[in-house]
Amino acid sequence: MRDDPLDLLPELFVLFGAVLGLLALTVSPRGGARWVVWLCALGLTGCLVSAVAAAFSPGGTVFGSYVLDPPTNVVRGVAALATLPCLVLARAGGLRPEAHVLMSLTALGAVTLAGAGDLLVLVAAYLLASVPGYALAGLSGDAPGTEAALKYYLVGAFLGVLTLTGVTLLYGLAGTSAYPGLGGALRAVPQAAVVCALVALFAGVMFKAGAVPGHFWVPDVAEGAPAAVAAFVTTVPKLGAFAALLRMAEEFLTSSAADWRLLLALVSVATMTLGNLAAFRQNNVRRLLAYSTISQAGYLLLPVVAVPAPLARPALLFYLGAYAVTNLGAFAVVVATGRDTLDRYTGLSGRSPALACALSVCLLGFAGTPPTAVFLGKVMAFTAVWQGGYAWLAVVAALNTVAGLFYYLRWIVPVFRPAPSPGGDAVVRSAALTAYAAATASLVLGVAGGVVLPP
């Protein structure tokens, strides 16, 4: 255990970037707006660089409640890398400069979720990852954005209260809120009470992950909020939520006699199945992507169920990075084209072949098509859950993957049909470049993943 603030340098970079950006807006509302995106981007870049450096440093616990280990460092890096293009998309979408500050603060909350080694830190991180997101969803100020923000807030507040209840019950049962002390203490208390506490605790984490039963906000926010905000809130908070679940599973859930694996396995099945079924008949591409992210949350739960299988941790961490680049790439195409319905993508390949290819790579990646990154992530996740003794869950996930291909093809097929009329609309260049970079990253990760991943 260490008490050196420099161990939190990545988090401090993000915090200082957001605070300085907010100060620039306060001191000079007009002139400061030009500096906000640069200050936030510098903070995120500093987070990324220092996270890479921290990955080669000894791990440990800082201030007795914040864990420095590979999951924390991976989420630090991936969250910074995912938030930077979201700043680009926000600027391309003409969002107010406050959006960049709110995105940085939400990213900081996601990173803190990943590193939390104490239930009290988990609650604080949950709030930091949630409250700025509520403001982001309603930043446009129109009726759909206001409705999205209200639903986002109400679901988050309700499930957050349940999480606080779970934290209170666990503390009362175990006499400690620190993860290392929870596992052994929970063995000596009534398991029915432990199960009730865990169900309540998981409620808020599932909200941040966009999984059942905390998924209700996802389609409404994806459709009603600006596209750049939808891309961000369906990507970055998930990173911290799943890393938090992984840490809880490794540090105290495995020591509990409660059957938490079966609980999460059932949540996984419900999440992937509901997401796929609801996406089948969607004509709005934002809602289609929203339900796609819900189904992906179901697959991301597989490695958590598989703990302590040796492949569980690398499978989840790789899948998180693969999901982030793929989801951002798909939403970047939506921002670049400004189109929200499937029929308006007819003939996109003739107007913008590169953008059509980027969209196809991302959507086929979500469907689990090689050699994309999500394909490799799914293979690892299925293998991990099979190793963990849940072969039936791997079979259900594989069937859901095949079923999900249908609605991704519903979007891809019109893209390569002849356009009903000649000519094309303007494409937002910065968003298009983001889509190209994300699609390329998906292919590179998928092809080169075997070099860095364990055999």
Image (cartoon, grey):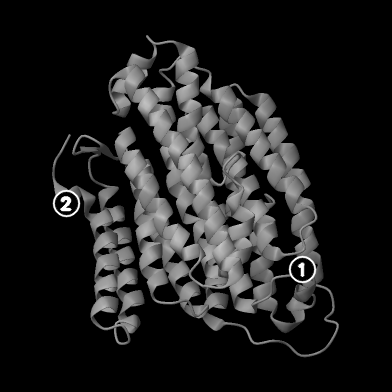
Q: Quadrant of residue 263?
A: top right
Which of the 4 image quarters holds residue 14? bottom left
Which residue is more in the foreground, 24 or 47? 24
Residue that badge 1 annotates: 342
Indicate the position of residue 306 as horizontal and vertical percent values.
53, 28
Relative placement, left or right, of 177 versus 89 is left
Which residue matches tag 2?
6
Which of the pair 283/352 is nearer the observer?
283
Quick check: can you spot residue 181?
A: yes
Residues under numbered marks 1 and 2 in contact, where contact means CB atoms less than 8 Å apart? no
**In terms of secondary structure, where does tag 1 sit?**
helix
Residue 370 in sight in this render? no
Vertical position of residue 86 compared to residue 276: above or below: below
Q: Position of residue 423 (x, y in %)?
A: 76, 90
Q: CA distance from mark 1 to mark 2?
A: 49 Å
Q: Residue at x 57, y 73 (%)?
A: 142
